[in-house]
Image (tube, helix red, strand yellow):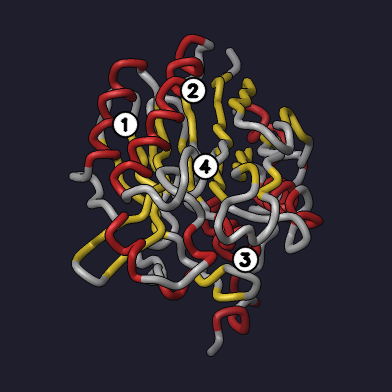
């Protein structure tokens, strides 16, 4: 019998003015997402992922210490706790991308992974941190990840996470495959004119090179007051052959779903023997300083 799992992605516009208090901003964005998660549950979604730092705007468009106070502990913070309750209620695996505080002054761009029974399985911290114009000043906010490339064995699939800018680096994508990922989620915040032409190129290439599924999520709309560009949505699922299975719109808050047949991974790997034919003993220069 095929191992078919229904998965979902949520792309969304920011929920309120950035002039509101940080608590109000968090509450508004969570209030926007909870009904969509409920909708996903009604549609039989078993694994779902939100966009990068889904509880707020993409504040890296500016450099101000105000946003440090929007961090949360993982797993003891309010958003992770809420998502654990929702996961258990709906028997759903939830990937929760938020701004994490490890300790005062030590902050990460992180995704918590929660199993279908509400168990906190662990977290992935974004490893590659950009600091580029226009308006992607992430080194001001995030310390580079220190947890490697973990794969989480959930009730439905073995999943990995790669966050936004990570997707430009094939090394981590390969590490996730070697660690056993069947699907890799990439919650993102990316704008037209910067890397849109790569959006549907790089991640299908990772899916092909590593023979796993990819779920890529991008936020939607123009975020004020910065307006660094249009977050162009177009979240999607692709399979281990790089074929698109479902794609969201460009300009609206949306849940997209796809039924993923994880048996296709074995089929593809038996056809393209990339893991058998790897030559890691020849790759030393890749990690030379």
In this rendering, position of residue 155 left or right of residue 129: left
Q: What number is the disc on residue 83? A: 1
Instruction: Tell me: residue 187, above or below residue 158.
Output: below
Q: Which residue is mark 2?
A: 36
Dot 3 lies on which element? loop
State whether residue 46 is above or below residue 278: above
Q: CA distance from mark 3 to mark 4?
A: 27 Å
Q: Is residue 162 visible?
A: yes
Query: What crowding class fits label 2: few (fewer than 14 Cα within 10 Å), some (14-19), or many (20 or more)?
Result: some
Q: Which mark is residue 14?
A: 4
The span from disc 4 to disc 2 (Cα, nearest Å) is 14 Å
Q: Compare marks 3 and 4 and give the one earlier in the sequence.
A: 4
Residue 270 visible to an observer of this rendering: no
First-in-chain label (2 vs 1): 2
Residue 182, position as x, y percentages in the image: 55, 38
Residue drawn at x 55%, y 44% as measured from the top left: 184
* Residue linked to disc 3: 169
Residue at mark 2 to residue at mark 1: CA–CA distance? 13 Å
Q: Residue 226 at what x, y percent from top left?
A: 58, 61
Circle 2: element type: helix
Task: Report the residue at 31% width, 31% height from top.
Answer: 83
Q: Earlier in the sequence, mark 4 or mark 2?
A: 4
State the separation of the CA atoms marked 3 and 2: 31 Å
Horizontal placement of 9 versus 168: left or right?
left
Q: Residue furthest front?
A: 19
Query: Of the residues under marks 1 and 3, which one precedes in the sequence?
Result: 1
Give the number of the mark in front: 4 or 1: 4
- What quarter of the picture does the N terminus occupy? top right
Circles 3 and 2: CB distance less than 8 Å? no
Q: Is residue 76 above or below residue 254?
A: below
- Check the image and name the residue furthest to the top: 42
């Amino acid at each position: 019998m095929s191992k078919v799992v229904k998965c979902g992605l949520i792309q969304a516009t920011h929920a309120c003015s950035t002039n509101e208090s940080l608590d109000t901003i968090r509450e508004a964005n969570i209030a926007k997402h909870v009904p969509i998660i409920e909708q996903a549950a009604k549609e039989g979604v078993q694994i779902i992922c939100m966009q990068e730092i889904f509880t707020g705007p993409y504040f890296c468009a500016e450099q101000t210490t105000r946003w440090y106070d929007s961090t949360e502990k993982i797993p003891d913070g309010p958003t992770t706790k809420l998502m654990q309750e929702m996961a258990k209620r709906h028997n759903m695996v939830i990937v929760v991308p938020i701004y994490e505080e490890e300790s005062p002054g030590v902050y990460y761009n992180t995704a918590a992974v929660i199993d279908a029974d509400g168990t906190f399985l662990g977290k992935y911290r974004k490893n590659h941190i950009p600091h580029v114009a226009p308006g992607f000043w992430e080194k001001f906010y995030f310390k580079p990840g220190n947890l490697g490339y973990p794969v989480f064995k959930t009730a439905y699939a073995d999943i990995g996470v790669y966050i936004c800018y990570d997707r430009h680096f094939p090394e981590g994508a390969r590490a996730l495959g070697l660690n056993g990922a069947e699907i890799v989620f990439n919650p993102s915040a990316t704008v037209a004119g910067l890397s849109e032409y790569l959006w549907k190129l790089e991640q299908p290439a990772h899916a092909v090179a590593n023979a796993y599924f990819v779920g890529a999520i991008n936020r939607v709309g123009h975020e004020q007051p910065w307006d660094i560009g249009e977050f162009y949505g177009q979240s999607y699922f692709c399979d281990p052959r790089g074929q698109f299975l479902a794609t969201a719109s460009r300009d609206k808050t949306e849940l997209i779903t796809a039924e993923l047949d994880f048996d296709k991974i074995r089929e593809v790997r038996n056809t393209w023997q990339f893991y058998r034919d790897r030559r890691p003993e020849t790759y030393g220069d890749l990690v030379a300083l």
